Every structure is written in structure tokens, then in C-alpha cells.
Image (spheres, rainbow, N blue to C red):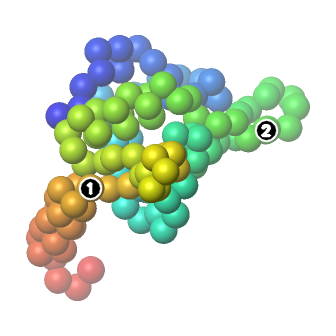
Amino acid sequence: MIYIQWAPLVKCSHANELSPLDPDWLFYKAAAIVRQVYISKSINIGIGTLKAFFGKKKRNGVRPPKFSKSGGKVIREIVTQLKKNGYVENYANQEGSTFGLVLTKTGRAELDKIASKLIKDRPLGN
């Protein structure tokens, strides 16, 4: 279960004008982060890569929009709680230096179970 006490009060990026309106935004963001780690073929996906992925163009009034990365605190908190629940771990080589995030066997099994359930429950013809 992912819970952050200050989640209702925060914006996800300084490019955002408002905080998220959906009360379940944190769960959707956590699912999107786990999905990105799951489908990533690279071992170099980390907080900085996720910040760039969830970034967007900031509106600058009359000036042209410019790309802005997402805030890192929310992503770091979600990754910390995913590590605590055993879904994600740091990828380390033989020397012990870490490169990024990778799913654990438990996390991959849980995501595969959810995906197969969604496919079974999908109506025919879609």
C-alpha cells in the first residue's frame, strides 16, 4: 500500500499550474512508474530518467513553452515504498556500483498476474 501524508497538498512538477484533482493520483503515478521499470529494456532507468519521462512543457505566458522535468520527491517516495514492498530493487554489478532500478521476481509475478486478469476480464471483440 502506497501512502504519502503530504500527497493531497503537492504539485508533481513546477510546470504544473494545479495540484492533481483525482484523489487516487498517487496510485496511478505508482502504477505508471512500475510499468516504466517493467517495460524498460535498459538497466539505467533511475530517478532522473523517470523525471524526464514524466516531464512536460511548461507554459511561460507569452514566451514559447519549454520542457521541464517532473518533480523528483514524489518519484523518490514512490520508488522507496516500492522497494519496501519488494517490487523494485537497485541493479548492481559485481563491483557493487548501482546503475538503476529493476523489478524483482515478486514484482514481475505480481504485474503478470494483474495483466493476465485484465486480459481475462476484457470483453470479446475489443
Q: Please name the residue shown 58% across and 35% down the image.
A: 70
Q: Quadrant of the N terminus?
A: top left
- Quadrant of the rendered structure where residue 55 is? top right
- Residue that lies at the very extreme toward the bottom in this rendered image: 125
Callout 1 environment at 10 Å: few (<14), some (14 to 19), or many (20+)?
A: some
Residue 116 occupies quadrant? bottom left
Residue 48 x %, y %: 59, 41
* Residue that badge 2 annotates: 66
Q: Amino acid at mark 2?
A: Lys
| Marking on residue 104 | 1
Q: Mark 1 against mark 2, which lies toward the viewer?
A: 1
Compare residues 38 and 62 and report the one nearer the observer.
Answer: 38
Residue 8: x and y in percent read 35, 18
Measuring 21% from the left and 44% from the top, which residue is drawn there? 86
Q: Nearer the viewer, residue 19 or 74?
A: 74
Image position of 121 (left or right of 85): left
Q: Residue at x 48, y 25 (%)?
A: 73
Q: Which element type, helix, strand or loop, lies under badge 1?
A: loop
For the C terminus, the quadrant is bottom left
In depth, the one of 65 and 117 nearer the eye is 117
Q: Which mark is residue 38?
A: none
Q: Eyeballing the image, is 99 above or below 117?
A: above
Count of labels shown?
2
Rendered view: 13 above or below 64: above
Q: Earlier in the sequence, mark 1 or mark 2?
A: 2
Q: Residue at x 37, y 61 (%)?
A: 38
Q: For label 2, count other residues whose C-alpha is less than 10 Å away and answer few (under 14), some (14-19) or many (20+).
A: few
Q: Is residue 111 visible?
A: no
Q: Position of residue 33 (x, y in %)?
A: 40, 47
Task: Please name the amino acid that badge 1 sits on.
Answer: Thr
Q: Is residue 106 left or right of residue 101?
A: left
